[in-house]
Image: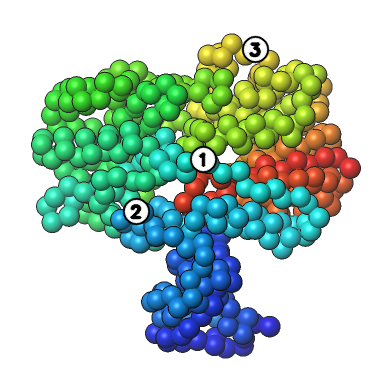
């Protein structure tokens, strides 16, 4: 029973024992059924906590010291772990992270989806869970007159200056430090979001892990980039594998990184990379998975669950730049991909062409409108694949899936809660969830991806 009145008050010092982690990696303790969330506390630990915020149904606290420590606790290797909001779980051993993610998926499927008999496999992790990110988006600013570049502190817009990020590929760190020194040399000012002044807002870097190609994107407040020629020359002289230098102009007062205008300053418009045998063109604003090694693990699992023999017609809803579609096209008779973002479909068609795949068709539009139109044209999916954003599938798409009755549905999810909700709906409409495979795409963070195999009962 939830307490009528909160059993704690602000600034209270209290000893708590933690029993779980939230979806964003905070420790959870319960007092008379009342949850208290504390960052960097782990299940099984007891510690002294100062209550910092009290709400009717929950409270937040700050961990002062640990009196009983979890066997899975490790020393976080990153020097700015406690300030930076990028990672949430560096203090939890990697095997402990994988177990937590499996438990989280199972708990959510049971609690939200009512799915108590579904097999949830152990999380597929990485052999080396560090330096995996192939893309960095680093805000630049000023502090006491000096240029700073780093990630935002947790739940804030304060930039934590840094030299190295332990989950970024080293190539990205090298670019950021180079741009920082070039900007200081030529007096290029960092952006002040409160005053809406300064030039350099973000540096975005993209790295092809297989091809070793680099793209550097300078996001500026206005069109002017002081000493542009010298800046380009120094980047080229220092980074022999740079293939593309791009400027994006974002004049708005906004938290959104990119503006509408993008200009190639030097080199190509795209770099290339591979996931498995499939080659992808990546532009400054393309969506491309940030951990290609684990993306292959994820897509291999999706392909396995599709059980393709070469005779099937597959529909890929939310196809993006065609990553899953092209993977499936290796084994399917024909794949149809649909995506609401027009630029993504341009990229998808280009990627199909690059790989010489003529058994794939892509369309721009809402999946719940395009798929029924395909159905009316006589295109019937034997297998459907969905890979929706965090909010899950649109209700109308789920209704379309139910009407089309594909023999098999493979659901790729970046949010176990909306996955559970959508699977519950499908189960009520005559589908059965056979198994769910969690995949650790983002080690050291609380995020987990899943692939679910669903069949028509």
Q: Real-space Cα distance between discs 3 and 1?
A: 36 Å
- The residue under label 1 is 127
Secondary structure at badge 3 equals loop
Residue placed under numbered mark 2 in the picture: 78
| Dot in front, 1 or 2 | 1
Instruction: Name the spot of residue 287 as percent of width and height, x first.
Output: 49, 33
Would residue 271 be visible to someone looking at this image?
A: yes
Looking at the rendering, which quadrant does residue 5 occupy? bottom right
In this rendering, would 23 be left or right of 53?
A: right
The answer to whether residue 90 is left or right of residue 180 is right
Q: Residue at the spot x=20%, y=40% of the render?
A: 180
Where's residue 447, x and y in %? 53, 51
Q: Secondary structure at mark 2?
A: loop
**Label located before the other in sequence (3 or 1):** 1
Bin the neighbour count of mark 3 within 10 Å (Cα to Cα): few under 14, some 14-19, many 20 and up: few
Circles 3, 2 touching at the beta carbon (< 8 Å): no
Q: How is the image coloured?
A: rainbow
Of the image marks 3 and 2, the number of the one nearer the N terminus: 2
Residue bearing the label numbered 3: 358
- Residue 375 appears in the figure: no
Q: Where is residue 378 drawn, in percent x and y?
A: 82, 22
């Amino acid at each position: 029973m939830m307490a009528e009145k909160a059993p704690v008050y602000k600034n209270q010092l209290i000893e708590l024992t933690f029993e779980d982690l939230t979806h964003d990696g905070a420790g959870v303790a319960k007092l008379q059924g009342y949850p208290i969330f504390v960052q960097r506390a782990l299940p099984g630990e007891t510690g002294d906590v100062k209550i910092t915020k009290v709400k009717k149904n929950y409270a937040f606290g700050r961990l002062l010291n640990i009196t009983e420590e979890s066997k899975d606790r490790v020393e976080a290797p990153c020097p700015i772990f406690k300030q930076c909001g990028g990672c949430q779980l560096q203090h939890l051993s990697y095997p402990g992270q994988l177990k937590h993610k499996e438990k989280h998926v199972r708990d959510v499927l049971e609690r939200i989806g009512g799915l108590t008999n579904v097999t949830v496999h152990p999380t597929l992790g990485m052999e080396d869970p560090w330096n995996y990110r192939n893309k960095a988006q680093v805000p630049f600013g000023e502090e006491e007159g000096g240029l700073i570049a780093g990630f935002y502190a947790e739940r804030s817009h304060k930039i934590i200056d840094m030299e190295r990020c332990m989950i970024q590929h080293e190539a990205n760190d090298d670019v950021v430090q180079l741009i920082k020194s070039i900007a200081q040399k030529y007096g290029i000012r960092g952006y002040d979001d409160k005053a809406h002044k300064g030039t350099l807002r973000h540096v975005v870097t993209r790295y092809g892990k297989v091809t070793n190609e680099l793209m550097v994107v300078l996001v500026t407040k206005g069109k002017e980039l002081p000493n542009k020629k010298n800046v380009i020359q120094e980047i080229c002289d220092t980074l022999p594998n740079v293939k593309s230098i791009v400027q994006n102009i974002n004049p708005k007062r906004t938290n959104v990184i990119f503006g509408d205008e993008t200009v190639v300053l030097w080199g190509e418009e795209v770099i290339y990379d591979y996931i498995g045998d499939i080659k992808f063109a990546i532009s400054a604003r393309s969506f491309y998975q940030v951990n290609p090694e684990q993306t292959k693990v994820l897509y291999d699992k999706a392909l396995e669950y599709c059980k393709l023999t070469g005779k099937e017609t597959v529909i890929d809803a939310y196809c993006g730049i065609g990553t899953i579609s092209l993977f499936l096209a290796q084994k399917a008779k024909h794949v149809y991909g649909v995506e609401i973002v027009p630029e993504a479909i341009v990229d998808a068609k280009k990627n199909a062409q690059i790989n010489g795949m003529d058994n794939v068709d892509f369309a721009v539009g809402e999946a719940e409108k395009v798929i029924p139109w395909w159905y009316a044209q006589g295109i019937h999916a034997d297998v459907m694949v969905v890979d929706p954003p965090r909010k899950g599938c649109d209700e109308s798409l789920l209704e379309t899936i139910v009407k089309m009755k594909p023999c098999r549905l493979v659901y790729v999810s970046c949010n176990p809660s909306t996955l559970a909700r959508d699977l519950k709906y499908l189960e009520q409409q005559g589908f059965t969830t056979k198994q769910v495979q969690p995949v650790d795409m983002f080690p050291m963070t609380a995020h987990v991806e899943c692939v679910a195999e669903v069949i028509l009962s």
